[in-house]
Image (spheres, rainbow, N blue to C red):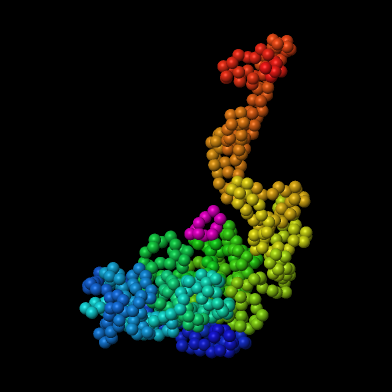
Amino acid sequence: MNYFDKPNNIQKDIGNDTNTFSNNDNNRRPQEQRKRKFESPKIFTPANSFAPIAKSERVPYIIPCQGQQVFSADKTRLFTLGAPIMSDHSSITYSTDNRELFAKIYTQKALQIDLFENKAKRMVKENVDIKGVCWPKALLTNSYGEFVGILVPSCSGVQLSKSVLSGTAAIKQFFPTWDKRDICTVSHTILDTICKLQKLGIRFGCFNPASVYIVNPTEVYFVDTDSWQIEGYPTLSRNVTFTPPELLSEQQKPRLFNKDEENYQIALLTFMLMMPGKYPYAKKRRVDSYESIKDMSFPFSLGGEARRSADAEKPSGAWQIVWDHLPFKMCSKFYHTFHANGDFSKPGSRLKDYEWAFAVEEFGRHLSLDENSESRSLMPRTFRRDDKREFARCRICNQEHPTFYFLRNIKIQNEKINIWDRGYRVCLPCAVDQSDASFNCKSCGKTFYYTNQTKIIHEIGRLNFDWNGQKWCHSCKKHSVKCSRCGTDVPVYQMQEYTDRKRNLKKNVCKNCFHDLINESKKENEWRNGIYTRGACRQCYQWFNITNGEAEYFKEKGMQLPSRCPSCRGRR
C-alpha cells in the first residue's frame, strides 16, 4: 500500500510517535513543534577525534567460510555459514542456517587492526531497534574463540543504487507499477529512518546508496551498519558522489564527518530520489565534472533572479519537465542548497534532515489529493498546466506543450527566420530528434539522417537561399589527413583528388594545392601549345609549326625535329 494513498492513514513516525495525515493542513503539527522529536538525548555521542586504533592482539589464523561454523561470543549459539550474499573490500556476508540472521565475516587483513572488533563491541552494547536497520546483534568467533565477525538481521530487496538512483528504466525493471507517489513513499521511508538514526547520534560518515535495499515503498533495509561513523570510529570508505564540495580537495583518507556535512548528503540523496538518478551538478563548459561540483554548478532555475549557474550545461528537456512538476517550495530548497549562491549552500547553513523529510511528505500528500495530476508520472511528458501557460500541439510527437517549449527561430546563412509564424510547430525535444530526411556522406559513403531542425533549415533554405545539401558527415568533418603536396593537416572532407593525366598520377591534396595544381597545369598546357619553331615541309613546301610540347617529346625520344608537316607525315 502506498504511504500516501489514504490521507488519514496513521503511520509510525520518528521517535515512536504517530502522525495523522489529514486533508486539512491546519490539523497538521507545525514544523517547529514536530522538530522537538529530533532533539531527544543521543545514545552515541559524536566525537571530534578518532578512537584509538592499534594492532590486534590476536589475529585469527582461520577465517570461516561457506559450510563452516561460527560461534556467538558467549558460546551459547552456533551458526553454519551458507552461500555468500554480499561482499566488500573488508568482509563477506553469508546466509546462515537461521533464515532471520546473516553472518558478516571480516577478512584476515581487516582483522589485523582492532578497529572492527572494538567498533562492533561498542555497537552491540546498544539495542538499536529501528525497523529496517540491520544493527549488529552479537559478535562472532571461530572455533578458537577469536573474533571474526558480527551477527546481523537478514535482509532482502534491490539496492537503491541499482533501482531508483539508476533512473526510470531501472525503476520500471524492478518496480513496474510504481509512480511518483511510490517514489515519495520510499523516499519518506528512507528519510524517516535516517532521522531516527541521526536522533541517536549515528552518522553515515559518507552515505553509500548500495547499502540500502528496497523491497517495497514501506519496506527498506539499511545494511553494512558497521561501516557507519559511530562516535570516534570513522567510516573507512569514501563515496565521491556524496562528498560535500568543500571536502573534494581532501585526499581520500578516514575522517570524522560533522552534522552539517551529513546534512549535505541527505539533501543530495533527496534530490536524486525526487529526480530519479539525476545528479544536481551539470558539467560546466570547458571544465571537467570535478570542477563543476566544486563550483556548485546547478543547472536548474526558479525564475526571476534565481537563475541556473553561469556556463552550466542546460539540462535536457525531460529533466526540465521533471523539475517543473516538483513543488516550488521543494525546488527552492534544492536551488538554495546546490547553487553556489544559494542561502543554504555554505557549510553551517544547510537544511536539517527532518526538513527534507517534511518536504517529501508534503509532496506525497499533494499527489494523493490531485487525482488528475500529470505529476504522478515518473517522467511526465509535458510541463504543469496552469492558467498562465498557453499550450500548443507538436506536429511531430503530437504532444501538447507550453508555447515556450517550441522551436521559434532558426538561423539560415546568418539570417534569423521566425518559423513559428510560418506554421512550424515543433517542440524542442523533437527539434533535435532524427527526421526522415537523410544524405550520403561523400567521404565515407554512409547514410546519415538530419535532425528535424536541420530538415526545416533545408526546407526553408532551398526556397530562400538556394541551400546546398549536406555532403559530409560529422565524423569525416573531424577526421584530418596530411596533404600529399604541402603536408598540412586538412579535414578529410576538404581533400580533393587531382589527376595528372600526362604523368598518369593521382594525388589527394588540400583545396589550395588543388587550385595551384590546376593553375600550373593550365600554364603547362599554354607552354606546350606555344610555338617552338617554324619550318617549310620538304615534301609539300608548306610552312608548319612545331610546338614546345612536340619538341620536348622528340628530344625525350632522342629523335630529330620533323622536316615534314603533320599531313605529309600522316600520308606515310
Q: Is residue 369 left or right of residue 101?
A: right
Q: Residue at x 48, y 82 (%)?
A: 219
**Residue sitting nearer the eye, 334 or 545:** 545
Name, please, the residue furthest toward the front.
572
Residue 289 lies in the magenta-colored region: yes
Residue 346 lies in the magenta-colored region: no
Report the span colored magenta: 283-292
Quadrant, the N terminus: bottom right
- The picture places residue 292, in percent across and down from the top left corner, at 52, 60
Q: Residue at x 56, y 89 (%)?
A: 9
Where 522 sits versus 145, above or below?
Answer: above
- The picture places residue 64, in percent across and down from the top left corner, at 28, 75
Q: Can residue 195 be seen by looking at this rendering?
A: no
Quadrant, the C terminus: top right
Total label count?
A: 0
Q: Can residue 376 be seen by looking at this rendering?
A: yes
- The picture places residue 362, in percent across and down from the top left corner, at 58, 80
Q: Could you say which quadrant of the image residue 450 lies in?
A: bottom right
Q: Residue at x 50, y 59 (%)?
A: 289
- The picture places residue 226, in percent across and down from the top left corner, at 36, 76
Q: Could you say which quadrant of the image residue 82 lies in?
A: bottom left
